[in-house]
């Protein structure tokens, strides 16, 4: 306030005399004068944060909110708090993609044998290849439906097998399981948990499990919580990579799913169940 007063009255009274009367140094006044017309330090810091948040948000294709963007920025060496990132996103009007309700895919109206629920909503693991889960979801394109079957290792929540087709068949789920088996090698005794849909109850699928020593486990009728980890993955996929985007062809959807699973979700996406490590990083750190 004193410096502002001196600046306003500098024509009538010499600056040095005003400084002496007000008990301030003339060098302090001239330093204030040099800074007066520049953006404040806080404003400059805010601008740097906003640019960094905008770039991180765009790199993640609008998939991340403030918690995961904060992790990205900290990992890159930019020290910033989550509430600061949230405030920056509000200033920039950046909103991460929001979720929708999804269509159920399970057809359990069949006479095929149903396995017992060995998992019992216990998703905890202390090693890889202890418990797997699998499921199917619909993906809409301009060329009609595509169906995606996945297999996740519950130890790291990593997608270890997946397959896509324009028909929801037994072969679809067998291809996803076959990819997982090939990727993991020795899986004797592993629990393979799914819903009780006809594809998973089929003789073809059960023979595949039996051949490799996998133990079949199935959810209760109509209970989505029994396979919550697979449902959670599908939610993330659709929110972060599909909804809000242009509806692609079958080929483009396959590319989009590949990109999300293999270059984002498995190797880069921070997962709360893994202590905010990606599935691949979690396995690398903890798998013996």
Image (cartoon, rainbow, N blue to C red):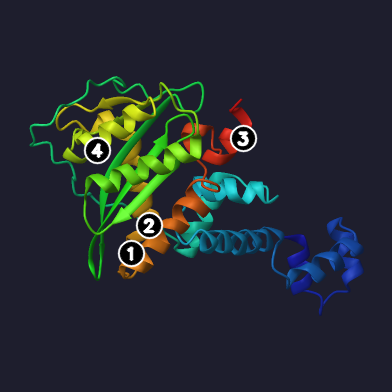
The residue where tag 3 is placed is 284
Asked which quadrant contains residue 215, the reply is: top left
In the displayed structure image, the side of residue 103 where residue 125 appears, left or right: right
Distance, label 4 to label 3, CA atoms, is 33 Å
Say which of marks 2 and 3 sits in front: 3
Distance, label 1 to label 3, CA atoms, is 33 Å
Q: Secondary structure at mark 2?
A: loop
Q: Nearer the viewer, residue 47 or 4?
A: 47
The residue where tag 4 is placed is 204
Distance, label 2 to label 1, CA atoms, is 7 Å
Residue at image point 54% right, 62% down: 59
Q: Secondary structure at mark 3?
A: helix
Asked which quadrant contains residue 16, the reply is: bottom right
Q: Nearer the viewer, residue 267 or 93?
A: 267
Q: Position of residue 286 (x, y in %)?
A: 60, 28
Residue 96 visible (yes or no): no
Circle nearer the N terminus (1, 3): 1
Circle nearer the N terminus (2, 4): 2
The residue where tag 2 is placed is 97
Q: Is residue 170 above or below residue 133?
A: below
Circle nearer the N terminus (4, 1): 4
Residue 237 visible (yes or no): yes
Distance, label 2 to label 3, CA atoms, is 30 Å
Residue at image point 39% right, 29% down: 212
Q: Is residue 78 above or below residue 29?
A: above
Q: Are marks 2 and 4 in contact (CB under 8 Å)?
A: no
Q: Secondary structure at mark 1?
A: loop
Q: Position of residue 279 (x, y in %)?
A: 52, 39
Q: Which mark is residue 166?
A: none
The residue where tag 1 is placed is 244
Say which of marks 4 and 3 sits in front: 4
């Amino acid at each position: 306030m004193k410096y502002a007063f001196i600046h306003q009255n500098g024509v009538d009274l010499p600056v040095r005399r005003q400084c002496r009367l007000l008990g301030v140094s003339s060098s302090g006044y001239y330093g204030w004068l040099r800074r007066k017309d520049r953006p404040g330090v806080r404003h400059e810091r805010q601008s740097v944060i906003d640019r960094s948040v905008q770039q991180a948000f765009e790199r993640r294709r609008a998939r991340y909110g403030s918690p995961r963007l904060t992790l990205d920025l900290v990992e890159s060496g930019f020290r910033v708090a989550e509430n600061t990132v949230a405030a920056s996103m509000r200033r920039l009007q950046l909103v991460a993609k929001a979720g929708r309700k999804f269509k159920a895919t399970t057809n359990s109206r069949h006479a095929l044998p149903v396995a017992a629920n060995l998992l019992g909503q216990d998703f905890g693991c202390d090693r890889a290849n202890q418990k797997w889960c699998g499921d199917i979801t619909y993906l809409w394109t301009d060329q009609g439906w595509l169906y995606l079957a996945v297999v996740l290792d519950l130890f790291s929540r990593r997608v270890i097998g997946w397959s896509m087709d324009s028909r929801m068949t037994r072969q679809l789920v067998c291809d996803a399981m076959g990819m997982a088996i090939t990727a993991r090698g020795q899986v004797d005794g592993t629990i393979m948990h799914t819903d009780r849909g006809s594809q998973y109850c089929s003789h073809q699928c059960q023979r595949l499990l039996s051949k490799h020593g996998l133990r079949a486990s199935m959810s209760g009728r109509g209970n989505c919580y029994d396979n919550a980890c697979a449902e959670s993955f599908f939610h993330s996929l659709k929110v972060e990579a599909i909804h809000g985007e242009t509806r692609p062809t079958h080929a483009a959807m396959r590319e989009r799913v590949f990109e999300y699973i293999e270059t984002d979700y498995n190797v880069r996406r921070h997962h709360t169940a893994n202590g905010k490590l990606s599935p691949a990083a979690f396995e690398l750190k903890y798998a013996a």
